[in-house]
Amino acid sequence: MAFLQVEMEIAKSSSSITRMITSLRKFFQYLAQENLLEHDPMLLIDTPKSQHHLPAVLSLTEIERLLQVPDTNKLLGMRDRAILEVMYATGLRVSELVNLKLSDLHLDLGLIQTLGKGQRERIIPIGSQAVKWLGKYLAEVRPRLLKQQTSSYVFLNFHGKQLTRQGIWKNLKQIVVQAGIDKDVTPHTLRHSFATHILENGADLRVVQELLGHADISTTQIYTHLSKKRLQRIYQQFHPRA
């Protein structure tokens, strides 16, 4: 149909076109049922395949630049450094991060536990650098944010309340700008970077699936595409006959 062809040519997203096709199909089905239409033209129209965009990933250099931005001489700077360290060390979803409770931390064992999607609990190792900064935050900053209040949540805002997902997003956006990183970085970018970097260093896909809390390994397999792209770049750069 000419209308859909025009929409495709002006670069409408595949999801927008799919919604249009679905609406038109229902409309023409109704006309056919009411005998107002002899032939349904939508039978000749295929729904476009959805586009799968690979997630952005930060390089190790960019990760280091992010980590160096928070001023750890300030309360919220120390907190933000701990947050960045934990996110990159564990690959937690932002919702899992803000819902972390003190009882979920087992820093003496280098482990944390979290309740992910579908109420699935998982145990995740946490590296020594993240343990160090999280320990400093818990000892030096969190009690001062609490003041006279009580809270079971690990990460708090300036008023001693549970830090929100929106708070994490806002802080990260500011940190990315200060780090001079010209990418669309979100909390999920740190999760993507965590998964990609450990795969590139030899981790098994099943292990990454377990760490990320994916119910289906097909969700985890997107990270193998990211690693393959990097391998192709290295090949093109260094192979004498590439």
Image (cartoon, grey):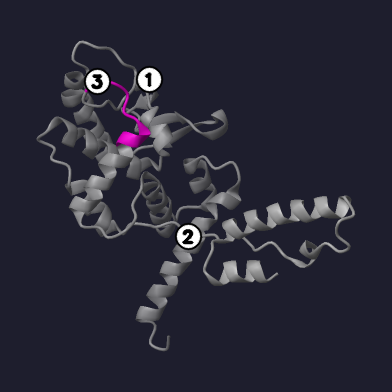
Q: Nearer the viewer, residue 105 or 47?
A: 47
Q: Quadrant of the N terminus?
A: bottom right
Compared with 190, 225 (above or below) is below
Closest to the camera, between mark 3 and mark 1, is 3
Which residue type carries mark 1? Ser
Q: Position of residue 36 (x, y in %)?
A: 86, 56
Left or right: 59, with 235 as reference point: left
Q: How far apart are the two marked residues, 2 and 3, measured between alpha carbons?
A: 37 Å
Left or right: 237, with 61 as reference point: right
Residue drawn at point x = 19 percent, y = 23 percent: 139
Which residue type carries mark 3? Gly
Q: Which quadrant of the view contains residue 135?
A: top left
* Residue 211 part of the magenta segment: no
Q: Earlier in the sequence, mark 2 or mark 1?
A: 2
The answer to whether residue 189 is seen in the rendering is yes
Q: Position of residue 104 (x, y in %)?
A: 39, 24
Compared with 203, 48 (above or below) is below
Q: Which residue is mark 3?
A: 160
Residue bounds of the magenta highlight = 159-167
Q: Earlier in the sequence, mark 2 or mark 3?
A: 2
Left or right: 80, with 58 as reference point: left
Q: How far apart are the two marked residues, 2 and 1, measured between alpha carbons?
A: 35 Å
Q: Which residue is mark 2?
A: 54
